[in-house]
Image (tube, rainbow, N blue to C red):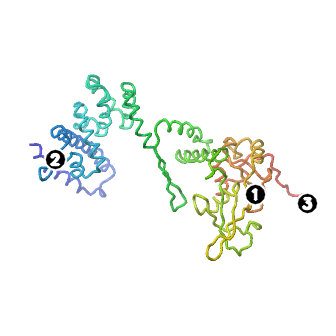
Amino acid sequence: MPVDVLPALAADVDALAAVPVIALPVASLMALVEQTAPLAARLDGVVSRAVGELQARGGGVVPDQDGAPLPLPAWLRDAAKVSGREAGRQVRTSQALRELPAVAAAVVDGTITAEHGRVLARLVGRLQPHVLLPSQGALLEVATRTDPEQLGHYVRHLIATWCEPELEADEKDPIDGRFLQLTHKDNGRVRGIFELPNADAEVLQTVLEPLARRDDGADTRTAGQRRADALTDVFALALRHGDLPNAGGSRPSLTYVVPAEAPSVLVDPDRLPSCPAGAWTGPATPATVAQLLCDARIDVLHVDAAHRVVSLSTGTGDITSAQRRAVATRDRCCTAKGCSRPPAFCDVHHLRARANGGSNDAANLVLLCCRHHSMWHRQQLTLQDLRVPWLRVPQPRAP
């Protein structure tokens, strides 16, 4: 009986689990992984084959402890200690692999992994059996040369070629399941996760790819940082030029909350409170404040001792469209050396900060892309790093 080998298998696994990996040299650790991982994949294949046989014999049910019928996924969820969703997926895959005996055998003998088998199982029901069964050898050849993700793309092309209606059905789930979630963390960051159907992702990547390229040989950003900067550029472009609903549609604003009896902080910029709040992201760091102040509206909210609003006053306003056009016509692109971001992707930056009395005159304004604008206010960029031949730098008087 096959179950007779299970005690010996369990004993071998116990012995392997008792190996003190902390004492093993690197070469031994690598060997442990290289030799154990294929065995684990083969065991997945054995389990899948057994689940498929249970599905076929019981029509999707197995007896519980009292002999009553129990759905196979519910039993597998408890037996394998997996989620209900994963149990259902394993049952469906095991059932499909019964239609691909050569593929199922390849998983058990370690030729391919169980994940490869799950990918190939997607073809069952999409391709006619008289086409699929003779193709198992070719499918296995591709599977042995690719990882599961690459194999998934290959399988998707097969479905598109042989069964276009099924491809359309496959696309419905991603469309219905699209989402984007933003989480404001307490460390000055916002983390986002999203999922898009391929059609929307095609648009996203077509826009981000050219914007995420390196500026020049001195660009040391990682690929992830370049994509993040490109995403910010795209939304900044929409903010500058898009016709957005009233919930947004304006330049960023900073609100300072001060006691009602305090003198007007707008008269003396040096007396601005140190920590204003952004509309969406809350308290801002000095560098972020300085960057936003270049082209933001500043509101001052006066409150009394009970935190009741006494008044709201607006001091500095947005840079006007005419000023923006004038600076864009003069600078033509980001003025940071080595950067060619066009005006649409640039902020208007104050060379002399507003908080230090800097004006909105064109002579005090330059174009900087979002990344270089942030670098300036983090003191990673100086006037010497900009292309500003029109700027008149005061010369020292002769003695």
Query: Residue furthest toward the left?
Result: 1
Instruction: Estimate the x, y position of residue 355 in percent, counting from the top left.
Output: 73, 62
Instruction: Estimate the x, y position of residue 157 in percent, counting from the top left.
Output: 40, 29
The residue carrying mark 1 is 352
Counting residues from the start of the chain, the first of labels 1 and 2 encountered is 2
Q: Secondary structure at mark 1?
A: loop
Instruction: Estimate the x, y position of residue 5 in percent, counting from the top left.
Output: 12, 46
* Dot 1 amino acid type: Arg
As measured in the structure, the alpha-carbon distance from the residue carrying label 2 to the one carrying label 3 is 103 Å
Q: Secondary structure at mark 2?
A: strand
As measured in the structure, the alpha-carbon distance from the residue carrying label 1 to the one carrying label 2 is 78 Å
Counting residues from the start of the chain, the first of labels 2 and 3 encountered is 2
Q: Nearer the viewer, mark 2 or mark 3?
A: 2
Q: Residues within 10 Å of mark 2 (few under 14, many from 20)?
A: few
As measured in the structure, the alpha-carbon distance from the residue carrying label 3 to the one carrying label 1 is 28 Å
**Quadrant of res 254:** bottom right
Viewer-closest of 20 and 81: 81
Counting residues from the start of the chain, the first of labels 3 and 1 encountered is 1
* Dot 2 amino acid type: Pro
Q: Nearer the viewer, mark 3 or mark 1?
A: 1
Image quarter hosting the N terminus = top left
Viewer-closest of 251 and 387: 251
Q: Do the CB atoms of the residues marked 1 and 2 lie less than 8 Å apart? A: no
Residue 322 vertical placement versus 293 (above, below)? above
Q: Do the CB atoms of the residues marked 2 and 3 lie less than 8 Å apart? A: no
Q: On residue 399, which mark appears? A: 3
Which residue occupies 21% across, 46% down?
Answer: 71
Q: Residues within 10 Å of mark 3 (few under 14, many from 20)?
A: few
Relative horizontal placement of residue 220, taking residue 116 as reference (left or right)? right
Which residue occupies 27% across, 51% down?
Answer: 82
The residue carrying mark 2 is 69
**Quadrant of res 328:** top right
